[in-house]
Amino acid sequence: MEIISTLIVGLIVGAIAKFLMPGNDPGGWIVTILLGIAGSFVGTYIAGMLGMAGPVGWIGSILGAMLLLFVYRLVKKS
């Protein structure tokens, strides 16, 4: 059940990351959502390692998605 909730959170987080980091993404909104899902997994993992949950997990997921989106933009522009 935790994986399913992380996927749903990832969809939401991808949309939030796109909203907070506007601009042209080379892959469009689908790639942004996939990066949000990956960022959600990264954020959930890091927050779990630090013993945090709840809203801190959400913030970590959003920051993880924004980091992945930033790195993706750098890689695709080169």
Image (cartoon, rainbow, N blue to C red):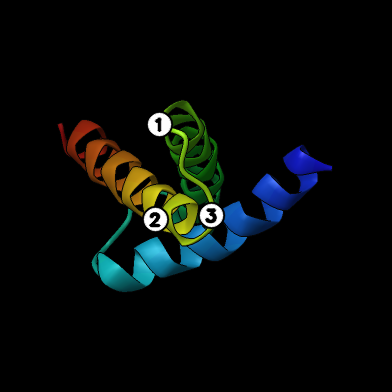
Residue identifier under label 1: 50
SS at circle 2? helix
**Image spot of residue 24 (x, y percent):** 27, 62
**Image spot of residue 36 (x, y percent):** 49, 50
Q: CA distance from mark 1 to mark 2?
A: 16 Å
Cβ atoms under marks 1 and 3 closer than 8 Å: no
Q: Nearer the viewer, residue 37 or 55?
A: 55
Cβ atoms under marks 1 and 2 closer than 8 Å: no
Residue identifier under label 2: 62
Q: Which comes before the other along the chain, label 1 or label 3?
A: 3
Under mark 2, the amino acid is Ile
Query: Which quadrant of the figure contains the C terminus?
Result: top left
Q: Nearer the viewer, residue 55 or 33?
A: 55
Q: Residue at x 56, y 45 (%)?
A: 37
SS at circle 1? loop
Q: Residue at x 42, y 54 (%)?
A: 56
Under mark 3, the amino acid is Ile
Q: Residue at x 55, y 55 (%)?
A: 30
Cβ atoms under marks 3 and 2 closer than 8 Å: no
Q: CA distance from mark 3 to mark 2?
A: 12 Å
**Which numbered disc, 3 or 2, marks the residue closer to the eye?**
2
**Image spot of residue 27 (x, y percent):** 42, 49
Under mark 1, the amino acid is Leu
Q: Residue at x 23, y 45 (%)?
A: 70
Residue identifier under label 3: 33
Few, some or many C-alpha atoms within 10 Å of disc 1 (few <14, some 14-19, many ≥20)?
few
Few, some or many C-alpha atoms within 10 Å of disc 2 (few <14, some 14-19, many ≥20)?
many
Q: Which comes before the other along the chain, label 1 or label 2?
A: 1
Identity of the residue furthest to the top in this view:
49
**Which numbered disc, 1 or 2, marks the residue closer to the eye?**
1
